[in-house]
Amino acid sequence: MYRLSRLRFLFPIGLLIAFFLDGSLSKVLANQFFSFPYSMVSQLVLLWLVLAYFFEGTVKIPLYGFAIAVGVLSDLYYSGIWGLFIVLYPLIVWLTKFLARLFTDNFFNTMLIFFIDVVVFEFLNYWAFVLIGVTHTNIGDFLLYTLAPTLALNLVYFVVLYWPINILYTKALAKKRS
Amino acid sequence: MRKFFSNRRLVFIVVVLVVAFGLMGGSVALRNRRQTPPLIQQFGNDIVGMVDGVVAYPVNAAQSGVNSFTDLLNTYSENKKLKQQVSELAQAKVRDQTLAKENRELKKELKVNKSMTDYSTISAAVLSRTPSSWQKQLIINKGQTSGIKKNMPVMSAGGLIGRITEVNKTNSKVELLSNTSESANRFAIQISGSGGKTVNGIITDYDSQSNSLVMGQVTSKAKIKKGTKVTTSGMGGVTPKGLYVGRVTKVTKDDYGLAQKVYIKPAANFNDVNIVTVAELDS
């Protein structure tokens, strides 16, 4: 039960911190993230949502609701354009659930699923922004200068944060039972 | 095997797509037309901005700690260079004061009240940056209550960095000059060419490969030298005259060989902005 578990506090607070860290890290490390012409997009929120699905165990976190909520925040605060992240985050949650059924549950498969999630996320983001005219970079530039560095950054996030988050969840869930 | 696109799912996907694109198109149109976003959006942004302050504070503190440490390592060599500049600066400052005073007196004589060079400034701190490779936006911690309005130019230590695009009550968004979106606002700038001629134009694009601003469609025949300083021209009536933009690095012909294309290296580093100054035209 989500309502009775400690994840009730851990998950939303972690989500908020991930959300604000995305922006803060982009500002503080702008020289590294946006060194011309490359640009890396920090996606800690995505990482938190995906890992929450894998670590939640028997506790069912209402991930779609939180994904929509954080999508609203992103649209409002970071982009100022409505309607993109509010759809993309729940979609990625759905995609993760869909893919998780096809793979057995281990570190490398989780990483592969996260990899696919980030690719799909960035592709749809790019496609939507091209359609509404926010950007007009061509697809080659997108692949080389945005997608590749973004994947690199987020996989580093994944490798660094997988075990700490895993321990966090294990502890939070263990306390519930005792 | 179960059919992937069942009727219900297909309808759901289409509806979501239509709503999403409707929202996106609508909000882009709304943003371009209105001076301020709808009240609900402002309210949400203010709340989120306040919470962001709590999370951003330790991160920014860590950054300034690291910065002061690296600054300390450079101090000796920097000090030598700066000492030389300080003596020149004092002279320039005094001259500037004298000229400003003379300018005021002459304006009074001519009964000109305010011109495009009279502006006041509002300082703000940068809270955060949009984590996106296409929307190059900063979020700053001053808004309507501090007198910030849409389209005001924003400067950082070095020079011009962008323009205010969205104003909430207590925070606002700044679109950087490195943004290449089609709706990005472009600044009117001027360069002094050969023979005392002034070349006017606008920033038409940003070249991310060389990190330079592009001033396209320059039909003037005046020769522009490399290294010439570029400033805003004050045309259009929103941006004050004489804000420093950068220096000319390259002058080429455009694709059709008819007009000149000027590449400008921006004076400010768009990726290292902590404090910004918003310029407000006195009127």
Image: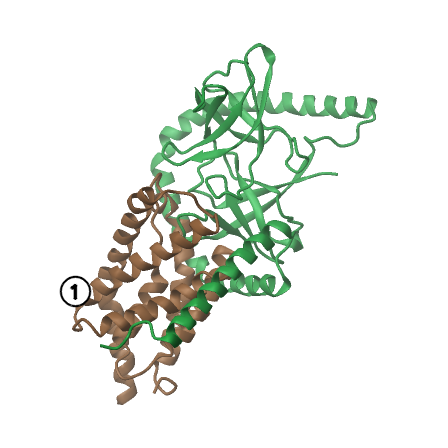
Chain colours: A brown, B green
Residue under numbered circle 1: A108
The residue located at (43%, 49%) in the rendering is: A130
Label 1 sits on what residue type?
Answer: Phe
Q: Quadrant of the C terminus of chain B?
A: top right
Residue A32 located left or right of residue B113: left
Q: Quadrant of the N terminus of chain B?
A: bottom left
In this view, the residue farthest toward the bottom is A178
The residue located at (65%, 31%) in the rendering is: B234
Nearer-the-camera pick, A68 or A156 = A68
Q: Position of residue B37 (x, y in %)?
A: 61, 57
Q: Position of residue B194 (x, y in %)?
A: 55, 12
Res B278 → quadrant? top right
Nearer-the-camera pick, B21 or B103 = B21
Nearer-the-camera pick, B205 or B45 = B205
> Could you tell me if residue B54 is visible in this image?
no
Q: Chain ID for label 1?
A: A
Q: Position of residue A36 (x, y in %)?
A: 35, 38
> Could you tell me if residue B278 is visible in this image?
yes
Res B89 → quadrant? top right
How crowded pointer 1 is (Cα within 10 Å; few <14, some 14-19, many 20+) is rated as few
The residue located at (65%, 48%) in the rendering is: B149
